[in-house]
Amino acid sequence: MEPYQLPWSPLDPAALPDLLADVGAPWWLAGGWSIDAFVGRVTRVHEDTDVLVLRRDQAAFRSALTSWDVHAADPPGTLRPWPVGETLPVGVHDVWCRPTPSSPWALQLMIDDTGGEDWVYRRDARLRRPVSSLAGPASDPARQVLAPEVQLLQKSKGRRPKDEADLAAAAPLLSPEARSWLRDALDLVSPGHDWVRSL
């Protein structure tokens, strides 16, 4: 059976601070769970648990998950083992993790690039934002939660039902600054995007 056909049993986001306690590099709860953290309630069923990390810190995260079975989407659409000590090629952005080879998948690392101290949007390098501003208002001392406007930008390309649901849940709660940033980002990378009307 191909790895992509195996089931998921998403890691509880509350377990992330302990799991990643020794990384020594920043990370952000991402995906649908980050939207729920922003909204303040669970709005839908979550099929996975996503964490955003920076490419420059990939070795620290791979070392922190030494005992786990970790696979890179390389090439995209295909999983292959990611051994400790290997630097992933540029262009590899997704890593699937599970406690053992026979376990369901539990965690997905989303690896994004940086330019200096700026985060770089993976689909359009013109769009950048200070790494220091990636944490949103749902962050707390135990964990950083990706800013909702950044997560919604990531979701804007797929337009899956769950992405539309996340937009509907989060958009009314965005601050004027977050709303303006997302609107400007969509105008830059996806001119004419339908979501702009919701902002």
Image (tube, rainbow, N blue to C red):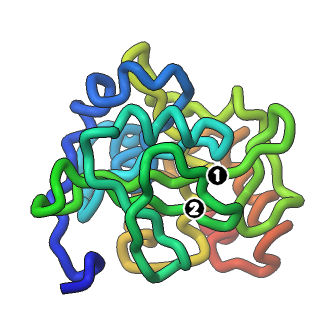
Residue 93 is marked as 2
Left or right relative to 170: residue 33: left
Residue at 81 percent across and 58 percent down: it is: 184
Real-space Cα distance between discs 2 and 1?
6 Å
Residue at 34 percent across and 39 percent down: it is: 65
Q: Quadrant of the N terminus?
A: bottom left
Tell me which label, 2 or 1, sits earlier in the chain.
Answer: 2
Looking at the picture, tell me which residue is in the foreground, 30 or 54: 54
In what element is the residue under mark 1?
Answer: strand
Looking at the picture, tell me which residue is in the foreground, 33 or 1: 1
Q: Residue furthest top?
A: 141
Picture quarter containing residue 31?
bottom left
- Amino acid on which disc 2 is placed: His
Q: Residue furthest left?
A: 102
Say which residue label 1 marks. Answer: 112
Residue at 55 percent across and 51 percent down: it is: 86
- Amino acid on which disc 1 is placed: Asp
